[in-house]
Image: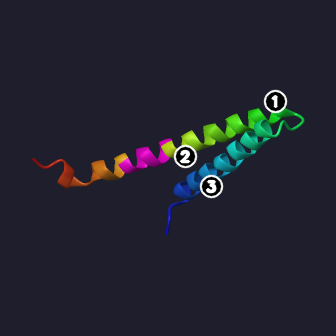
Amino acid sequence: MVPLMKRIALFAFILGVVLATLAYFAEIYDWVGLQEYLTVGFTGYVLIISAAAYYMSSILIEWSAEPAYWEA
């Protein structure tokens, strides 16, 4: 069973990818309201970076809890 925070981070990552892709297509095809789509894309980038930071920090916490890494 995956912990709740990891599921939330995974959802944020997937949502961020979708929003960034939407902004990419808005820029490529010159959609009306381009500035709003670019703002949504920036939000997507923030979600991607936040989810990646959470996963990296959780991996570091798991690794630091294992005593085999700290033995000489």
Mark 3: amino acid:
Phe
Mark 2: amino acid:
Ala
The numbered mark at residue 51 is 2
Residue 65: % across, % down = 29, 52
- Which residue is label 3 attached to? 11
- Left or right? Give the position of 61 relative to 21: left
**Magenta-drawn stretch contains 56:** yes
Residue appearing at x 68%, y 42% in the figure: 20
Residue appearing at x 65%, y 46% in the figure: 16
Q: CA distance from mark 1 to mark 3?
A: 25 Å
**Circle nearer the N terminus (2, 3):** 3
Residue 5: % across, % down = 54, 54
Label 2: how many residues lie within 10 Å, few (<14), some (14-19) or many (20+)? many
Q: CA distance from mark 2 to mark 3?
A: 9 Å
Residue appearing at x 88%, y 34% in the figure: 33
- Left or right? Give the position of 31 relative to 51: right
- Which residue is label 1 attached to? 35
Q: Residue furthest top?
A: 35
| Above or below, 63 relative to 28 | below
- Left or right? Give the position of 7 relative to 65: right
Q: Residue furthest right?
A: 32
Label 2 sits on a secondary structure element that is: helix
